[in-house]
Amino acid sequence: MNLLESMTAGAADMASHRGRAIITMIGIVLGVASVVTVLALMGGGQKQTEAFFDEMGGLRELRITNTRTDRVFMTAAERASERLTYRDAQAIRNECPSVATVDPEIVRFLTVTYGDKTYGMKFLGTTRDYPFADDMPVARGRFITDKDCENYANVVMMGPTYQEDLFGGEEAIGKTIVVEGIPFEVVGLMTKKEFYFRGGGGQSDRNVLEWFNRSHYIPITTMVKRFTVGDRLDGLEIAAKSVDLVPKLKEEARTVLLRRHGVLDFTIESKSEEIQQQAQQEAFFNIIFWATAFVSLFVGGVVIANILLASITERIREIGVRKAIGASGRDVFVQFLVEALVVTSAGGALGLAVGFGMTAAVDRFLEMPTAMTPSIPVIAFATSVAVGIVFGLFPAVRAARLDPVEALRYE
């Protein structure tokens, strides 16, 4: 008997015992469906995280923050440091070859009056790079320019949320609002920024980027001159010219700031590092998902091994007859291994269909993000075939090693 005949015999035997094959298949179906759903959930979570960071400026961006100043033990140099300032931002712009945008921010909550309406609103003092650093394009009008910063201009770019509150149906651009008693001309309106996390425990209806829309933007020099004492920053974000230059820019910015401050009183974090931290936080849940899928596949594999071993007991005389008429141990081994592979392959195919259905149900009814990529069905199906090989080996080896004389005597 050649290899093809052995494979044909194995497939035919499974076809003649459909009930046994179906029972054997159930564990594989559930296991493969679990693998598909787990991979889709993991991919969806990663895709959602990447989309969020893209909305926040992308992987080219670095965030520079002050270290804590409330520590008990601090050196004299640390106490004397001015921390991050607008002058630091200008130095980075001028001295770092890899930098593309520099976004310094000073935040204040100020009283705004227009006509008979008065509100407390959030203002950011910043520069022309802000829309590019945080991927927030202008809807109408213009943003702050270098000339505005040079002239300490009283101009404001408004976020969209409060436009209706202040102006109703009026055109906002060109109007004058009063900020802490000082008139400011509205020169532009920002595009509404939106992002909704799915599967966030009821947060799918909350726009996590609404704070962008509730902010107004003025030249940073005007903020320093009118509303602050000094130019200490509340935030500083910089972006590299390309993703490949992020590590180089991080080192350049660190060198500039360390030279200016004299102490390491700041931290520099990249978006890619934040994504890695996010992935580490989600790792526990991914382990649970994988454990569930592995247990299902393991149970399916054990069922395959047990049923094949029981099948060997039922077919000892048949095996003895086959060996007596010339079948080799390899022929018997291939037949039983093929039976395992047929079951797991069929179970894998059905498991893919069930997995696609489960993924669609999770996405629709549980509102959890999923992402189905071409690699997912390949990985899931390959896993089912691997289970068939691993758990089919022992029964196949046992059948191949049966002594034909003893097998023919078996009652």
Image (cartoon, rainbow, N blue to C red):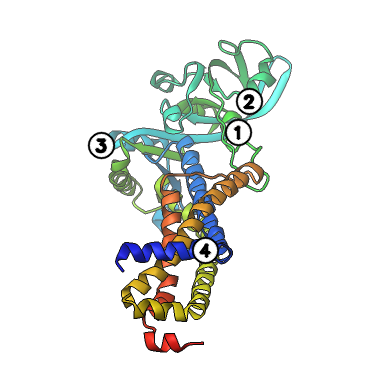
Mark 1: which amino acid? Answer: Glu
Q: Is residue 381 left or right of residue 6?
A: right
The Cα atoms of the two marked residues, 3 and 4, are separated by 73 Å
Task: Kindly state the secondary structure of the residue where label 3 is placed.
Answer: loop
Numbered mark located on residue 97 in the image: 3
Q: Position of residue 28 (x, y in %)?
A: 52, 62
Depth check: 181 or 207 in front? 207
Alpha-carbon span between mark 4 and mark 1: 63 Å
Query: At 54% from the left edge and 45% from the top edge, which residue is drawn?
Result: 370
Q: Residues within 10 Å of mark 1 (few under 14, many from 20)?
A: some
Q: Earlier in the sequence, mark 4 or mark 1?
A: 4
Q: Is residue 380 above or below residue 241?
A: below
Kindly identify which residue carries mark 4: 16
Image location of residue 118, percent across then percent down? 71, 23
Q: Residue furthest front?
A: 325
Q: In the picture provided, is 139 more to the left or to the right than 81?
A: right
Q: Amino acid at mark 3?
A: Pro
**Which is nearer the N-term, disc 3 or disc 4?**
4
Quadrant position of the N terminus in the picture: bottom left
- Mark 2–mark 1 contact, CB under 8 Å? yes
Marks 2 and 4, the one that precedes in the sequence? 4
Mark 2 to mark 4 CA distance (whole Å): 69 Å
Label number found at residue 409? none
Q: Quick one: 87 or 56, which is closer to the camera?
A: 56
Q: Nearer the viewer, mark 2 or mark 4?
A: 4
What residue is disc 2 on? 161
The nearer-to-camera label among 3 and 4 is 4
Nearest the viewer among 196 and 338 is 338
Q: Which residue is mark 1?
A: 210
Camera-nearest residue between 54 and 253 = 54
Give how far across and how far down residue 354 sits, in percent: 57, 51
Distance Cα–Cα, label 2 vs label 1: 8 Å
